[in-house]
Amino acid sequence: MAISKNSDNGNEIFPVVDEDGNVVGKASRAECHGGSKLLHPVVHLHVFDSENRLFLQRRPDWKDIQPGKWDTAVGGHVDLNETPEAALRREVREEIGLTDFQPVMIARYVFESDRERELVHVWKTVTDKRLSPTEELAGGRFWSLSEITENLGKNVFTPNFESEFRRFLSDDFPH
C-alpha cells in the first residue's frame, strides 16, 4: 500500500509460501524480516531503456532492509490474497508511476539473507517513458553497464540486486 511514511509497517501481513509459491500461512512484516526465515513472496522489475541502460532506485534511509542502497527499479511484497502479477503492476505504479508496460518473466528463485527468506519473482521490461519515483523511494536513475560493474562489491547496491544482475541481467548488456 502506498502511504507517505518514515518507517515500514511491521504489522503488515504477508503470505507465507512454500518454494513453489503455494500459500501455507501468513505472518507480519516484523516476523518475516526479524530472522524467522519465513518464506514470503516478492516481485522485482528491472527496467531497461532503449539505450540498454538499467533504471535503479535508491532505497530510503528509513527502510528496515538495506536502507540507502541502490536496488532493482521496482521491488515489493506480494499482499495476502494477491497474485505476483497483480503485485507487480501495483508496485510498479506505486514506486515509479508506470502503468503501461509489458513485463517479461525471467526467473523465480529463493533469496536468503541473515534476516529473511524471499521467493523472488523477477521480470524485466523496456521503456523510454518518463519514470517518476514516488515518496516510497529516495530517487532513481538509469545506470550504464560500466557504472554498474564499476560499483559491484563496493556496498553501493543491495546484495539482492548484485546477485540478480550477475545471474540474470549482465548478458542483456552488450559486451
Image (cartoon, helix red, strand yellow):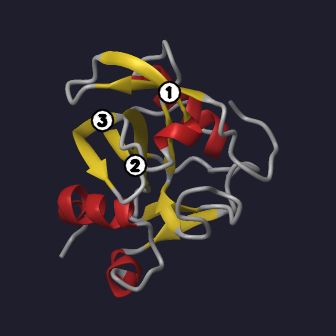
Which numbered disc covers residue 173?
none
Q: Secondary structure at mark 1?
A: strand
Q: Is residue 159 left or right of residue 75?
A: left
Q: Residue at x 40, y 32 (%)?
A: 102
Q: What amino acid is found at the position of numbered circle 1 in the picture? A: Ala
Q: Is residue 147 left or right of residue 68?
A: left
Q: Secondary structure at mark 3?
A: strand
Q: Could you tell which of marks 3 and 2 lies nearer the N-terminus?
A: 3
Q: Residue at x 42, y 37 (%)?
A: 42
Residue 59 image offset from top left, x and y in percent:
61, 61
Q: Secondary structure at mark 2?
A: loop
Q: Find the distance from the CA under tag 3 to the CA under tag 2.
A: 26 Å
Res 122 → quadrant: top left
Seen from the viewer's position, the closer of residues 117 and 99 is 117
- 8 lies above or below 86: below
Seen from the viewer's position, the closer of residues 17 and 30 is 30
Q: Decide: marks 1, 3 in contact (CB < 8 A)?
A: no
- Label 2, on which residue? 116
Quadrant placement of the N terminus: top right
Q: Is residue 51 left or right of residue 86?
A: left
- 19 lies above or below 162: above
Q: Find the distance from the CA under tag 1 to the CA under tag 3.
A: 29 Å
Quadrant placement of the C terminus: bottom left
- Label 1, on which residue? 27
Residue 108 image offset from top left, x and y in percent:
23, 38
Residue 135 image offset from top left, x and y in percent:
76, 50
Q: Could you tell which of marks 2 and 1 lies nearer the N-terminus?
A: 1
Which numbered disc covers residue 104?
3
Q: Could you tell which of marks 1 and 3 lies nearer the N-terminus?
A: 1
Q: Residue at x 54, y 70 (%)?
A: 69
